[in-house]
Image (cartoon, rainbow, N blue to C red):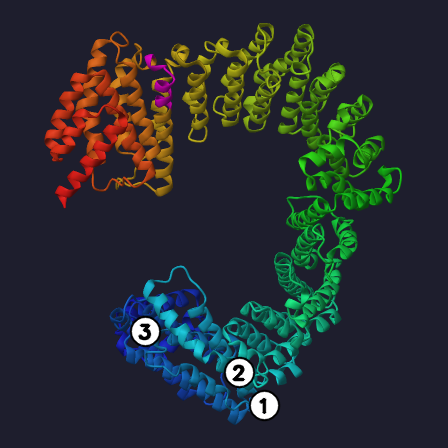
Amino acid sequence: MNVSYSTTTTMQSSSSCLSPQDLQQVILTAGMIGSSTNGSISADQAKVASKYLDALRSNPVIYVTKCLELLKYRMDQNVGSRDEVDNHVVFFILSSFQIGLTKASIAENNYDRDRVLAPNIREDIRNGVLTYLNQYIVALEQFSTNNGASVMPPFLQTKLAVVLAKYIHLEYPNGSWPGAFEHLMELLSKIDLQDERQRAASLLKIGIFVRTLDAVSDEIIMFRSERGKEEVNRNVLIKNSLKSNNSLILQKLLGSSGLMMLLEKVERHKDIVILILSTMKRYIGWVDWSIVVSQEHNILHHIAACIRAGTQIAVLGLECFLELMDRTTDMEQKIFLLTRLNIFSTLPSIDLDEDIDLSIKIAEVDAAVGIELLIYYDEVLDEQHMSSKTNMDLPDSLLGAVESLLNQTLQLFWKCFAYDDIDVTGAVIPFAQRLVNTLGKQMERSNENCTKPTFNVLEHIPNLVSIMYKQLCYPNDFRFDYTDEDDAEEEMFRSNLRKVNKKITQLLPNESLQYLCNVLSNLPMPLSSATTCELEASLRLVFHYCEGLSAKDASSAVEAGPFRQVIIALHQSNVFEHHHFEVIALYYDIAVRYASILRSDSNLLSKVLSAMSGSQGIQHSHPRVRSRSCYLLLKLVKEMGPVLRPFVVTAVGGIKEMISRQQTELQSGDILNLFETMGILIGKTQLSLSDQKEYLIAVITPHVSSINDLISSSELIRDPETFGEVLATLIAAISSLSKGFSKPCAEIKSIMMETVPILLAALKALPSDERVRVKTIVTLHRMILVLGHDILNPITPFLQILIFHCSYNDITDVTQLLNQLCSKFKSSVVQTINAAVIPFLQKCHSIIPEKDNNNEIAPHLDTEQLLVRKLGFVFLQHIVSKKATKVLVSEINKPNLENVLAEMKYGALEVVDPSIRKSCILFFKGLLDQWSEVGSVDDIIRTGFLGFITSSLLPDLLKGVMDPNFDVSDAMNIRVVVQTSKLLEILQAQYHSPYNHFMGNFLQNSGCAASTATAFSSASTSADIEKCLLQMREDILKNIR
């Protein structure tokens, strides 16, 4: 076939007429390999060829058959040497076989499988692949690589192995290849790695055998969630059959593959050794223990040799060892394994600097073994203690072996724990945690006068703590940038270390405090000159010390004693003058955590406040120090309360001046924290009313002026993105300031009320900015709490603007504001929200995502739709539950009452979410109850509403409950039944005649039993009505059945 063929001609030609040579040319053209009659292959030609192959793939039978013909053609053409063309074509053929077998494999039953790919074609695939492999091996044996024979590239070996694994998946053990693994093991019957002429063929046999086992593991053993039931059952059958052959397979893998010989020249054969070990790791967990310990199979001998080989080979050898450790739960077997491999004589001799991956694996092994031994050791000693037995009741040799091994693991542990790499040290931290747990158990037993254990953890704690402190020190070049992945890993590592230290403090508080004091005393003076890493680690010990104590002991430690003196000494030092930002921030954290010490010492308090509010605090050049100082100053002020009264004048003046001077350098959160700080200083330090007013006016006046200047400037219009954020922060600052006043007097309220007009002006200046709207809502929430009823009239224009401009992102915030108004002011809110109810409901509907032309909606948009509708339902239910019902029948809202009722009916009946349905039924229940009295609402409205309930809502509600698809076993659904029963209860109690008329008609047409109808007539409580409804449902379902 000429490679310049046209698409139309090729597509129209019969696939059955396609010769192997033609197919080969199409494959090469698609891969842009070789050349055409007109020169090199163009991208367009390759594209056309690819389309042709895609069309051919649509019929797996023809596709696979043609590939089988092509494979035979290739074998006829190549006897010895093979080139890039052969490799590319054969790889394509094997990929085609893989696709065909995969399609057959995922078929749900044998009939469908045979229809996809008939058994004879599947068998032809196997025979073709094995014949090709055998020809390749013979060629290597006859010609050798020195005489022109080419070694099969690894990618081709892997693909061939995958095809065999796919076939095994289909035809083993009850199909056409019950002896699959015996056949494969024959590959290893004649392995000769010594003879140079046979080595290439031997390596190919080993490679195919191992790669096939690896592919079988991927295909059959490894779990995949998308597998169907039939495939799972087939895999179980294959696994069960494999288990009987697994020992023999492993023997072939280790012995016949010549692993020991390969290890002798590991650098030359590293890839194949790694492949053998990786596969062995997958299968070794299946081997019977008798095979593991058998001298005949030499499994442990092979693993030991691999561990001694170093680098990646040793890593895989250790992983095989861990698989064997997990294989058994018997400690005697584990100890046998450890002693037979002599693992803790081999591992300590390995240089941890040789290979980092090996170092990490050594640490993991040491931790895994150490934890296993400690768990067993604790269990044995606990059993002895509980049963008052002596060591003679257990085999002395076993217990002695465990203690000996523990000492060996501990020697390697110290080496790994002190190593200068967090991955290595981090791997043994679980061992350290287990050591501390064992210490706790040993201390419990010692308190009950038990014999001291031979392996006494307490003796090792000083070394553990000493190394841990060194590891807590960050590297000298550490940047403390927790957004950086490496820095975050360093911090997580030290966080895990601190957990170990916390547990040690819990068990040994006095010893931990003594060590802390020793560490601090070894720091150079003044502290501002100490190295960052050591000082930071020391301060961390101070900061976290009390976390290891009970609440009572922590309080005692701070009130009196050495720890209190440590904190006082820190405050008296110049540590806050240190050059590193992290040290300064950590010191302020300590000051706030142990703030009770400052409460009783005004001098220390004054020093800390000066530092935090000065150039080493909120005015520091580093943003982290500034931010932490703003936040911690707020926490300190909250903690101190009235104690700060003498400092208010200085603090408020200084903060106010600093904000005006450094506002562009401060982050939004910093400004808000500072305003809240000023609010608490003014409102909660027991100042006189005149002082409160004076300071509050002094803060608010310039702030209002700043807002006014911004909304009047052209900057807001020119760059709303930047200055919108500034305006939002200025608005939120008023909210933060107000947090200092919980129940202010009238004078304070009048001052705070002066901020409302400027808030409205700010909102009007940039109503389209979501940040401005959200911060305005947040501030209005605070004003509701601070100003009380005084906010009701001023808030109305805010609602109009917020509702009009809100989007899907902030309509929830608007809803919460409306709901808070209803909850706080109840019936008094009617006039305030009167003009907002219908616009808000209309806004909800306008935001709801619409369906497409097919009347469908995407799942995520469906969720958004439900969320927005829910906001409307909840708001209306709030109106009723908070007794603001009159707003629904006001002159401007009355014309829409029918639409409101219809919408709530929709929520009660059609919405899937049971919680929404419950809210909507509660809405009607509340209206029915509140409008029961004559004069509570216009008679026409009352009569119409009652008619709506009895002729529209209740019939449909009860119809839904009686529906066979309604799941009454669902706790959420049963709420609907409960609320429907309560609705009927109110109707019966308040509207007796309409109730009897409605229930009479309903019972007559329901088809329920006479006894149920009688029970309904006497039911007077919602519980009785609920039982009757459920019984009626049972009666109806019986009739249907």
Q: Which residues are magenta?
A: 875-886
Say which label, 3 or 2, has the lower sequence index: 3
**Image point (82%, 23%), residue name:** 603
- Determine which quarter of the picture holds residue 1008: top left
Q: Position of residue 295 (x, y in %)?
A: 59, 84
Queried whether the magenta region covers residue 877, the answer comes back as: yes
Queried whether the magenta region covers residue 34, the answer comes back as: no
Q: Position of residue 641 (x, y in %)?
A: 69, 20
In the picture of the structure, the residue carrying the numbered disc 3 is: 63
Location of residue 996 with respect to 856 vertically, above or below = above
- Determine which quarter of the picture holds residue 125: bottom left
In the picture of the structure, the residue carrying the numbered disc 2 is: 251
Q: Nearer the viewer, residue 620 or 472?
A: 472
Location of residue 878 with respect to 531 vertically, above or below = above
* Residue 278, visible in the rendered structure: yes
Q: Secondary structure at mark 2?
A: helix
Q: Give the quarter of the figure containing the N terminus.
A: bottom left
In the picture of the structure, the residue carrying the numbered disc 1 is: 146
Number of residues whose C-alpha sits closer than 10 Å to that of mark 2, classed few (under 14), some (14–19) or many (20 or more): some
